[in-house]
Image (cartoon, coloured by chain):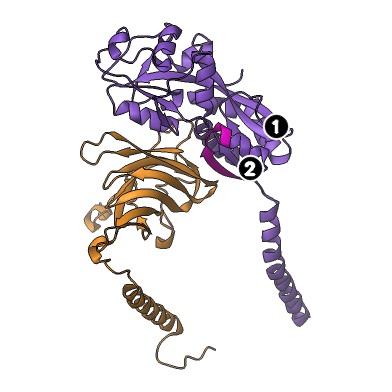
């Protein structure tokens, strides 16, 4: 028999402690921000995944295309997934933010496989979308048994920023940004339940 | 009796708990890692082949794929930094001794221009004139719709594609020193794609967004490369220090001797036979 000493359940107590620690870490982090850094300087990235069953040499399912951009010049990035990554395109295109056409910017990707992801270095100017392919060992549209097991992918970028006082460039690493999951074909609809009247007939 | 049984079960469970974590690192350590560096032309093929090999051999190995260019791959494998150096050029007399160049596939090198400038064809004399720098204006290229200076894009000296281009297309004619140097196939493709006056050469895999110029009257296509009609074809190698051994040997044998590998190579490259 487990005795609970206080009125709070131990699991809940742990959660409260983690939340408090995170808040404290956030405060300390805010105090440690370099002089001149402000909220406006925080680099942001965002993007999405799309199913790609047309990657030559990759049998579907598992093929995906990623597309993201950042509000800063990108010098490198890593794609990280909670699924096993077993292929990635080795050269990645950078599109022009306005026209959508390919630019002279580009990334070369390297890394281990199978693994949780891969890294790419090159350059993409402010806002230009970066687009490439990768493949995972499972169907990206496979329905997860638990919410925590849902297919997720993040991008972490190395970006160039400018000190707002000296205007000198410096390199920063962004937080992980989650890429929007691919649009999966909706599961076959269950037949509507019969009403009582229909059941009686 | 019941107690004894319970004790036995408890001991077995304990033994399992102790044995499993001890066994996991041993199994992980037993799995070999094949590291590859080098050619940016071979890299896309190596990535596709590795995915298939992992599923066929049930994740018997781990891979690590790096790039850098053929010369980097050859230097890395010679120094023992990687298991395999990927090379898209033939062996050179200046390469370190003791290396084995394992041929894995053939690849076509295509001459490319911007889509706004669909040059209908070029012969070897024309390629030598343009890439050698004796013809610098589009008005000197028959069939070109552009005017003005030709913006030439070539590969950096560490590139196998550069070496193969020199041998196959240029012979003894030196490449124009004023050409823009790019570190990868993708960068050449993008430079030409975004420059109406641009011209360059790339592996067939990198020709999706540009105009591909027929060479010696033969279009640079996979079919023509396979049939042997297109002559701008070079070899892909996986270079090992001494004869390939262990996991690397099994991997290279799988690439060169199985239908599954040939099927992948045939999607955009030319299998050995």
Q: Residue at x 72, y 66 (%)?
A: B19
Left or right position of A99 against B136: left
As measured in the structure, the alpha-carbon distance from the residue carrying label 2 to the one carrying label 1 is: 13 Å
Magenta residue check for B184: no
Q: In the displayed structure, would residue B34 be above or below residue B256?
A: below
Marks 2 and 1 in Cβ contact (< 8 Å): no
For image coordinates 48% across by 24% down, the residue present is B268
- Residue at 53% across / 13% down in the picture? B172
The number of discs equals 2
**Chain A: drawing colour:** orange
Determine which residue is flagged by label 1.
B99
Q: Is residue B160 or residue A190 the one in the foreground?
A: B160
User: Is residue A95 placed above or below A165 in the rendered structure?
Assistant: above
Give the image location of residue A186, x and y in percent. Answer: 32, 46
Q: Main secondary structure of the magenta part?
A: strand
Quadrant, the N terminus of chain B: bottom right
Q: Which quadrant of the view contains residue A40? A: bottom left
Residue B66 position within the rendered picture, expressed as x and y whole percent measured from the top left: 54, 42
The colour assigned to chain B within the rendered structure: purple
Q: Position of residue B110 (x, y in %)?
A: 43, 19
Q: Which residue is mark 2?
A: B82
* Nearer-N-terminus badge (2/1): 2
Magenta residues span B62-72
For mark 2, give the secondary structure.
loop
What subunit carries mark 1?
Answer: B
């Amino acid at each position: 028999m487990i005795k609970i000493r206080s009125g709070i359940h131990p699991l809940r107590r742990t959660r409260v402690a983690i939340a408090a620690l995170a808040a404290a870490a956030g405060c300390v982090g805010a105090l440690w921000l370099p002089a001149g850094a402000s909220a406006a300087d925080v680099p942001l990235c965002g993007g999405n995944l799309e199913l790609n069953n047309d990657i030559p040499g990759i049998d579907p399912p598992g093929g995906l295309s990623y597309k993201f951009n950042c509000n800063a010049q990108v010098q490198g990035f890593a794609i990280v997934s909670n699924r096993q990554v077993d292929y990635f395109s080795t050269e990645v295109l950078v599109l022009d933010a306005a026209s959508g056409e390919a630019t002279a910017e580009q990334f070369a990707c390297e890394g281990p496989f199978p693994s949780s992801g891969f890294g790419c270095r090159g350059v993409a100017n402010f806002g230009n979308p970066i687009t490439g392919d990768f493949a995972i060992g499972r169907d990206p549209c496979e329905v997860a048994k638990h919410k925590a097991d849902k297919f997720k992918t993040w991008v972490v970028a190395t970006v160039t920023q400018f000190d707002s006082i000296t205007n000198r460039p410096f390199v920063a690493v962004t937080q992980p940004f989650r890429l929007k999951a691919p649009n999966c074909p909706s599961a076959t609809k269950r037949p509507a339940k019969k009403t009582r009247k229909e059941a009686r007939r | 009796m019941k107690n004894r049984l319970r004790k036995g079960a408890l001991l077995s469970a304990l033994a399992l708990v102790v044995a499993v974590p001890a066994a996991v690192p041993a199994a992980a350590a037993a799995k070999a890692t094949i590291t590859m560096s080098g050619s940016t032309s071979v890299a896309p093929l190596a990535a596709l082949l590795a995915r298939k090999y992992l599923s066929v051999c049930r994740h018997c190995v781990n891979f690590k794929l790096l790039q850098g260019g053929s010369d980097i791959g050859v230097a890395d494998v010679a120094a023992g930094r990687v298991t395999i150096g990927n090379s898209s050029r033939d062996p050179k007399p200046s390469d370190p001794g003791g290396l084995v160049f394992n041929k894995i596939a053939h690849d076509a090198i295509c001459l490319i221009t911007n889509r706004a400038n669909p040059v209908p064809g070029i012969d070897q004399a024309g390629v030598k004139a343009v890439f050698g720098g004796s013809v610098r204006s589009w008005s000197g290229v028959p069939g070109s719709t552009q005017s003005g200076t030709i913006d030439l894009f070539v590969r950096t000296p560490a590139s196998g594609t550069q070496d193969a281009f020199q041998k196959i297309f240029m012979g003894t004619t030196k490449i124009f020193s004023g050409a823009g140097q790019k570190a990868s196939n993708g960068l050449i493709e993008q430079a030409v794609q975004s420059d109406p006056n641009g011209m360059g050469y790339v592996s067939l895999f990198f020709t999706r967004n540009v105009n591909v110029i027929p060479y010696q009257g033969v279009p640079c296509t996979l079919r023509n490369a396979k049939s042997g009609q297109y002559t701008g074809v070079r070899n892909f190698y996986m270079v090992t220090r001494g004869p390939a051994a262990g996991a690397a040997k099994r991997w290279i044998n799988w690439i060169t001797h199985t239908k599954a590998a040939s099927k992948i190579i045939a999607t955009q490259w030319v299998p050995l036979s």
